[in-house]
Image (tube, grey):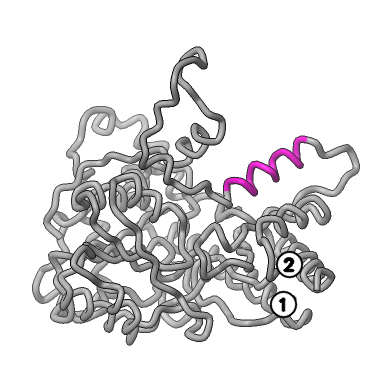
Amino acid sequence: MHMRLRLLLPHYQNIYRVRRTGWRGFGGGGAAILGERAKRVRQSGIREVMELAWEVERNTKPGQQGLIHLEVGQPDFESPNAVLKAASKAITNKAYQSYISNQGLPDLREAVSSTALQNAHRSWRENSLVTQGCVTVCHGAVGAISSVLHATLNIGDEILIPDPSWSNYAMMVTLLGGVPIPYSLHRSLNWCPDPDEVSKLCGDKTKGIIITSPSNPCGSVMPMETLSSLARLSSTKGLLVISDEIYSRVYYGEGLRAPGLLQVDCMDLDPERLVVVDGVSKYWAMTGFRVGWAAATAALTDPSALLEAEKMTRNFKKRRDAAIRVVREFGLYEYTPQGAFYMLIKATDGDDMEFCKRLLQEERVAVSPGSAFGDVAKGFVRISLASSLKDVENGVKKLCQTILNSR
């Protein structure tokens, strides 16, 4: 990918807040200034639950049980010590206190490109297709996706988006005048897509496809056969492919990373139309390092930081296994997530947001409604395994009991 992408990251959650509160400029007077595209952006069900959870916490009385937070993907681990030391040292380094390349620090870009090649198909190395010049550092993975869409999307272009998936994909496409087109992740395929079904969604206006593996909210991982089929499909249709691999290292199978598009033979897709997005937020527990690449250079190569990050993944796996044991005990088991730190559980045939509100008020457990991620996950709830093992076990037990009591 030889584009130079400039960052322009809309504050999507602020758009929700503006729309919800009816902000009308300084002083509160005058007509609302929101554009038509912003008005079409859906409110985030995750944020709605988070706001309600915070309100419940503010009203918690002394001696009352604390809340169990299973609604948000915020790792409860500290960032690796090597990262914190490197960040502290960088702050006092004069070389990092002035303007740098728009693409980001060269040493960081080199570390990113060399790391990306470690598990790549040999064809990518033999053809020198992933180099420092291909890497652009952005404000986290969301900034990278936003930048790519800003650089490529025209009014009316269609982008294929997994359903269910992280709601910001559709928000970004909509705000830029594009049209998000959902493609289903099927329960019968372990929450993976059917490539033939995806192919039928492609039309004259289809510009690209977003692929997410491991998945948020499902925790599913696409097998290589599916990835290869989607790669060939994108090449045949001439699609831009944005592969969001932010959870690729939070993987419970064999190897250090989940299968990704760089493991596909480069002859099966157009390298000029592939963008692989990654970052440090999840695997390295660095969600707050929004411009953290400069501080995180050591994280990509420092052995002690790698050991800490691998330990976090082992802990996420223990939590996943604990959650699976609980849902099995209650007879609600459907599948086992293979990556990320999320899991979908069928909760209701009715309104999943109302179910989440009731669970929060009655059991003081916060989870996210499946409808926040698309139509396919309606009636499900997403739990996050980023909380402590104790909270995961207790929270999932209360969730399962509430589900059974509602039937």
Pointer 1: residues within 10 angstroms few (<14), some, or many (20+)?
Answer: some
Residue under label 2, please give it. 396
Q: Residue 149: give x, y in percent of width and height.
A: 26, 51
Rendered position, 392 above or below 287: below
Nearest to the observer: residue 194 or residue 50: 194
Expressed as whole percent of the image width and height from the top left, the position of residue 244 reads 35, 62
Determine if the magenta segment contains residue 14.
no
**Residue 5, image x, y percentages:** 19, 47
Residue sitting at the far left = 127
In the image, which residues are magenta?
47-58
| 145 to the left or right of 320 | left
Q: Is residue 223 visible?
A: yes
> Is residue 49 a member of the stretch shown in magenta?
yes
Q: Amino acid at mark 2?
A: Val
Gap in angstroms between the C-alphas marked 2 and 1: 8 Å
Going from N to C along the chain, the mark reached first, 2 or 1, is 1
Q: Relative to 120, is 352 above or below?
A: above
Three-letter amino acid code of the residue under disc 1: Val
Whether residue 162 sits left or right of residue 310 in the image: it is left
Q: Nearer the viewer, residue 201 or 330?
A: 201
Q: Secondary structure at mark 2?
A: helix
Main secondary structure of the magenta stretch: helix
Write the residue at 26% across / 47% down. 147
Asked if residue 88 lies left or right of residue 96, the reply is right
Task: Where is residue 324? Give x, y as percent.
Answer: 67, 77
Residue placed under numbered mark 1 in the picture: 327
Locate the C terminus and report the quarter of the image it occupies: bottom right
Numbered badge on residue 380: none
Q: Is residue 70 visible?
A: no
